[in-house]
Amino acid sequence: MKVGDRHYRSIWREDETGKVMIIDQRWLPHEFRIVSLDTLEDFETAIRDMWVRGAPLIGATAAYGIAVEMARDPSDAALDNAWDVLHETRPTAINLRWALDDMRSLLRNTPVERRADEAMRRAAEICDMDVEANRQIGLHGLEILRAIARKKAPGEPVNVLTHCNAGWVATVDWGTATSPIYHAVEDGLGVHVWVDETRPRNQGAQLTSWELNSHGIDHHLVVDNAGGHLMQHGDVDVVIVGTDRTTASGDVCNKIGTYLKALAAHDNDIPFYVALPSSTIDWTVHDGLAEIPIEQRDETEVTRVFGKLDDGSTASVQISPDGTPGANPAFDVTPARLITGLITERGIAEPSREGLLALFPERRD
Ligand code: MRU
């Protein structure tokens, strides 16, 4: 998507140098910093410390991490080690394992002398596939927004609530939850977005607001606890969120707080959609609550906040008394029964095993 007058993806290979470049998201929205990832250790750090984040982008970054390592050492041992190192970085987003498995099975069947080139080619292809999947998600989601708009008074915008950042910087481009919004706005539909701040790391405040602001899309940032109130007062027409792992039976694991939004939407009869490329479906998992590992992050993300000071510099400040312990589960699971539909690149699935298999019949045993 556009930043200033240039089109960016969130990860790309520079033509002149062949280097893999990313936007270092830790500094957004205050600074737009681009860095190269040159070694396996760089990729490990960038994923673990959330220079890049968002399930699809984590997968794409891991694919390039394997490719960069293959350029250094294309042996089986290096391939297996890179798989292990990158797989350890973050436990919840399944796109990570999806991309690593994809790369390893391809490269295992590639002669060693061709592995470096083949790995770079496939990593670029994984990025392109993500962009196209998200574009399709946007077109399917646009139909939902159009249908809502038809029921509203002329000129009234469709009010979408979203949680965390499932925007273009969480993917390679377009975003998942935001893709229908970008498509709707391009189509001339009036859309207004409620952006949950998304404590503790504030991906909504820092990233989704930045994206929507850059694209001139009408939005308001709200605290995480405001969603239920807005829904009770008729100010939300639809909730659209992303996901880090969706089970074969349609349970959705996403950023902590998503479940509470789904409960409030259910209580207020508001449609609750989840947007995802099929690389986010874990076909091996059926019970989201019991089987999905939930990342526990550092307590300082809870006891401190990061932001811009009045003098323009950025800083992390403590918000709790010295010594207060913090607990920081980063994701939660929304059961399929609270979800209206799963917006995938192949269309909108009912959140159930049969619903998903109707769109992905090749997954039927
Ligand atoms: O911890 P993060 O920032 O990686 O979490 C991101 C989310 O929870 C997103 O909603 C999810 O990855 C979907 S991104 C299209």
Image: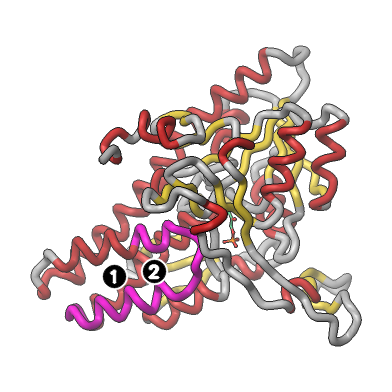
Q: Position of residue 25 (x, y in %)?
A: 60, 66
Mark 1: give few (<14), some (14-19) or many (20+) Cα within 10 Å.
many
In percent of width and height, residue 174 lies at 51, 44
Residue appearing at x 54%, y 22% in the figure: 143
| Magenta-colored span | 73-99
How are the residues colored? secondary structure
* 84 magenta-colored: yes
Q: Amino acid at mark 2?
A: Val
Badge 1 amino acid: Ala
Report the side of 271 relative to 362 (left or right): right
| Label placed on residue 25 | none
> Residue sitting at 73 percent across and 40 percent down?
263
Circle 1 sits on which residue?
67
Inter-mark Cα distance, 2 to 1 = 10 Å
Mark carried by residue 20: 2
Magenta-colored segment: predominant secondary structure? helix
The quadrant of the rendering that contains the C terminus is top left
Vertical position of residue 159 compared to residue 207: above or below: above
The quarter of the picture where residue 364 lies is: top left
Find residue 26 and report its horizontal and vertical position in percent. Answer: 63, 70
The residue closer to the viewer here, 267 or 214, is 267
> Looking at the image, which is closer to me, 77 or 259?
259
